[in-house]
Amino acid sequence: MSDVARTAGVSVATVSKVVNGRYGVAEATVERVQQVIRQLGYEASLGAQSLRSHRTNVLGILVAEFEPFSTELLKGASREVAGSGYQLLAYSGGDGGGAAIGWERRSLARLSGTLIDGAVIVTPTVVETKPGFHVVAVDPHTGPSGLPTVDSDNFAGAVLATEYLLSLGHRRIGHISGRPDLESARLREAGFRKAMADAGVPVDERLVRVGGFRIESTAGTAAELLALPDRPTAIFAGNDLSAISTMDVARSMGLTVPDDLSVIGFDNIPESALVDPPLTTIMQPLQRMGAEALRLLVDLIAGVERDTHIRLPTELVVRASCGPYRPGPEVPLSRAATAGG
């Protein structure tokens, strides 16, 4: 305020009145002070503003880390916030590895009520909210509960992925699942098992393994699967990062995708279209999920009565990483039939 007052040639008290919208300042002086504020690039402190009005007109989108999934959600939320009267604060509260326990609680304790008026939290575990402070969870660990939520139809998407591999003639299909503590991962595995059962194809439990939704943790799992003497001819990976990691491992082991191994992912992050070969995947509308979560949060703050659980559809996106089953020396047809593959 001292800088503004000095530049505008007025007192600090006058600047304070202008900033806080008080009466007693000539219109020409108000315009001059506001012009100086704009020229100097100054903005009122959010913390001080919240102390005065109990509002900052800022919404938070809180993530454990900025990886492709959360980044796509953020894109959708940032588009939706335009014209809402709010600004958006993106905040990473994890440890960079996506596994910091309690990051949601710490983030909310740090930001709620002083810097943000409400929050969209991506893949939270347990969220404890303050009375009157609104939170929307995207893809929460435990699935929809009492908390307003936005997610996609993970079960139906997994059924689509598995049915597509079955339609190509694959029977010896592996599944690299996500994090065991995440409801979306459990639903994707359940969808995989349902499609296999409906097709009358037994699931070889040796081919169902945890990958953890991350490139690094998937690599070892994929290598173990592909080193089996009766390795899978196709793999449904729990997300696109796991699928991309699986293709990298296959290539390092001298296998060709899709001639030797078909791979399908889940999410349809931008990277899925850029890998070689482009990844066939299940699209969950990530940007729309971010937009829906932001819109739901704004409505909750405004007191709008509406459905607080939103589930969006998933779709199969066919690219080039899946091909028809081709019996070869690694998986003879007679052995595959005996093994249910």
Image: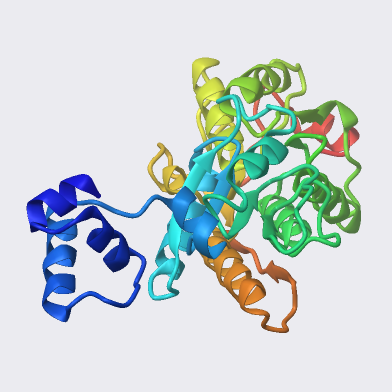
**Side (left or right) of 204 relative to 312:** right
| Viewer-side residue, 208 vs 311 | 311
Task: Tell me if residue 273 comes above or below residue 284 in the rendering.
Answer: above
Task: Tell me if residue 298 comes above or below residue 40 in the rendering.
Answer: below
| Viewer-side residue, 239 vs 195 | 239
**Side (left or right) of 264 relative to 174:** left
Residue 10 in percent (x, y) is at 13, 59
Hey, which quadrant is residue 94 in on the image? top right
**Side (left or right) of 122 relative to 194:** left
**Side (left or right) of 275 relative to 243:** left
Residue 2 in percent (x, y) is at 21, 46
Residue 55 in percent (x, y) is at 53, 63
Residue 160 in percent (x, y) is at 70, 59
Labels in figure, total? 0
Residue plotted at (68% across, 27% down): 100
Residue plotted at (30% across, 54% down): 43
Task: Tell me if residue 12 comes above or below residue 96 in the rendering.
Answer: below
Q: Is residue 158 visible?
A: yes
